[in-house]
Amino acid sequence: MKELPAIFQNGEQVYAVDTCEPLKAAVLRDEVQLHAWGHALYPGILLPRTFLPAVRSVGVWDAPTRQSWGLDRHCNEGIEFTYLERGKTVFEVDGKPCMLRKEHLTITRPWQFHRVGDPHIGSCRLVWLILDVNVRRPNQTWQWPEWLLCSPEDLRLLTRLLSHNEQPVWRANDEVAQWFGKLGLLLEEIPSPEAGETKLKFYINALLIALMEMLERERIPLDDYLSSSQRAVQAFLHALPQHAASDWNLAAMASQCGLSRSQFSDYCKELTGTTPMQYLTQCRIDLAAKLLTGRPELSITDVAYQCGFNSSQYFATVFRAAKACSPRAFVAQPQAVVHTSPER
């Protein structure tokens, strides 16, 4: 199976996460100042594998003017917190854009697709932290790093506040803003991660406690559904159209949600009104329709294989049943309309 975003991680399977390549390129062009530490392919100074592995990325960028780049739609391999210290920029979560302004805080979970920019970044200074709590889907158990100072009771409260609420944008209070500011200054002033390890742990601890207290004071409505198996299936189905061409079967889809095949099938029918394989086929047909109209240089056979069909003959049969015409006739239609799958 080809690499997929974080929501599809399962066991030891390799998955792809956003590595901020446009940001890296902008730094090389001297368009933005960057101070960051991260594991794997995240931007900034590469952290040793055993150095605070839960801290996947922590950084600050300072864009003095409107940029020529943006971060496209992606997921992360941990929960991401960002804070806008200065300026403004567009931020989008699950297809819903908003304008971030000074003192706005964002919180996104690994299964929430989001992007920064419209498609370009505005002039702004942004601090971020991606902390891996070993979840890739809503119904998994959060595992916080051992170096956090919170009591078990407080960690349970923090987990509930973050997992049973998916509001992405908040107005940060003074205490939360203070600790984000200290994180940014630490990254700018400390010459190496090893020299800053103690302060980094302390600041993250203080930030999480401040976030917990802020969210608790907000008296936000909490919804157990958001950490349920049905929510996990919903998140999976929402992302599936982008990866419909992969070699999926019922067992593989159920495994990605941590469910049995019958459980997954039941939830899929509740959410879409169809069986998992029918839903997958519809996603592939939608993808094929987009390729047929948007990539005229591709042959019908090429489109079939790129959409996960094993033969052009079977693809043509399924396509005709869904669109009431052959793929070739669909291409010939003037201003062909691509019908998307039901709202997820």
Image: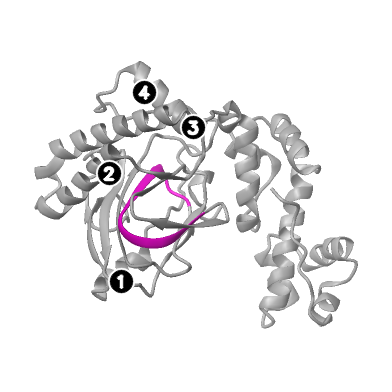
Q: Residue at image x 84%, y 60%?
A: 318
Q: Nearer the viewer, residue 152 or 260?
A: 152
Name the residue type under label 3: Ser
Mark 2 — residue?
177
* Type of colouring: one colour
Q: Nearer the viewer, residue 15 or 279?
A: 279
Taking 232 as reference, is 338 above or below it? below
Label 2 element class: helix
The magenta stretch spans residue 84 = yes
Task: State the image coordinates of residue 155 (x, y, percent, origin top left).
Answer: 36, 23
Report the magenta stretch's main SS.
strand
- The crowding category of the residue bearing disc 4, from other C-alpha atoms within 10 Å (few below 14, some 14 to 19, many at least 20), is some
Task: State the image coordinates of residue 171 (x, y, percent, origin top left).
Answer: 39, 44
What is the number of the mark on residue 163? 3
4 or 3: tag closer to the N-terminus: 4
Name the residue type under label 2: Ala
Chain part drawn in magenta:
75-92
Mark 4 — residue?
155
Label 4 element class: helix
1 or 4: tag closer to the N-terminus: 1
Residue 30 falls left or right of residue 160: left
> Marks 4 and 2, Cα distance to the nearest angstrom?
21 Å
Mark toward the viewer: 4 or 2: 2
